[in-house]
Every structure is written in C-alpha cells, then in structure tokens.
Image (cartoon, rainbow, N blue to C red):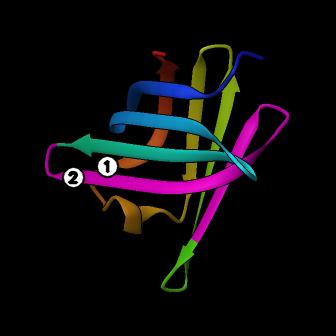
Amino acid sequence: MNNIVGNWKGNLEGEGNMTVKPAQDGYSVSLDVSAPGCTGSFEGSGTLAANTLKLTKTEDGQTCVLKVEFSDSQATVTEDGCMSYHGAACGFSGSLKKIN
C-alpha cells in the first residue's frame, strides 16, 4: 500500500479535505467538510490496521467513530455518531483522492 501521509481531497457529504500526518501512536488526522450552509471538522489520532485507519473521539458523552479505508490513491470515509462535528446538512462519509 502507498504511504497514507499527505493531503486528500474529494467528495464527502460536501467538499472534503483531509490531512494525515505521522504521530507517536499512529497517525494524526484533520478532516474538514463544507457544503452550502454547513461546515464541519474533526481532529484526532488513530492506528492503521490492514488498510483501515480508525479514529474515535468522545466529547460530552457522545462518541464519534471515523473509519478511513485506503486503496491505492483513494480513501473511503465512513462515520458513526459524528453529527455533532458537522451538523445535519453535511457529513464525513464519501471518497477522497490523494493530492500530495
């Protein structure tokens, strides 16, 4: 598998951007989405198992789980319980392509 570190852009439930950097315990991820009337962002760290990076963040009693599955230069993002990070009009699910 190609290196996942870098910048990714594409179509989530809105326009998506993701930056993946190496971290002490795995990878640090910054994920943003924007659509008319909606913006969202998520920052966290996770570990890579096989080709899937899993990030979990709990705030105010709500747990958001993001899974990013990498295949060559494409990343497929799925989410569970993350609406508090982006609102109802957009979301993190979709596909991104590596740009650098």
Span of residues in magenta? 36-57
Q: Residue at x 68, y 33 (%)?
A: 69
Q: Would residue 19 appear left or right of 56 to someone viewing this image?
A: left
Q: Residue at x 49, y 19 (%)?
A: 97
Q: Please tell me how crowded label 1 is: few (under 14), some (14-19), or many (20+) other residues with Cα within 10 Å.
A: many
Q: Which residue is mark 2?
A: 38
Q: Please tell me how crowded label 2 is: few (under 14), some (14-19), or many (20+) other residues with Cα within 10 Å.
A: some
Give above or below for 42 relative to 76.
below
Q: Nearer the viewer, residue 36 or 5?
A: 5
Query: Tag 1, which secondary structure?
Result: loop
Residue 29 location, x and y as percent? 54, 45
Residue 39 location, x and y as percent? 25, 51
Amino acid at circle 1 = Cys
Magenta residues: mostly which secondary structure? strand
Q: Residue furthest right?
A: 50
Give above or below for 86 relative to 93.
below
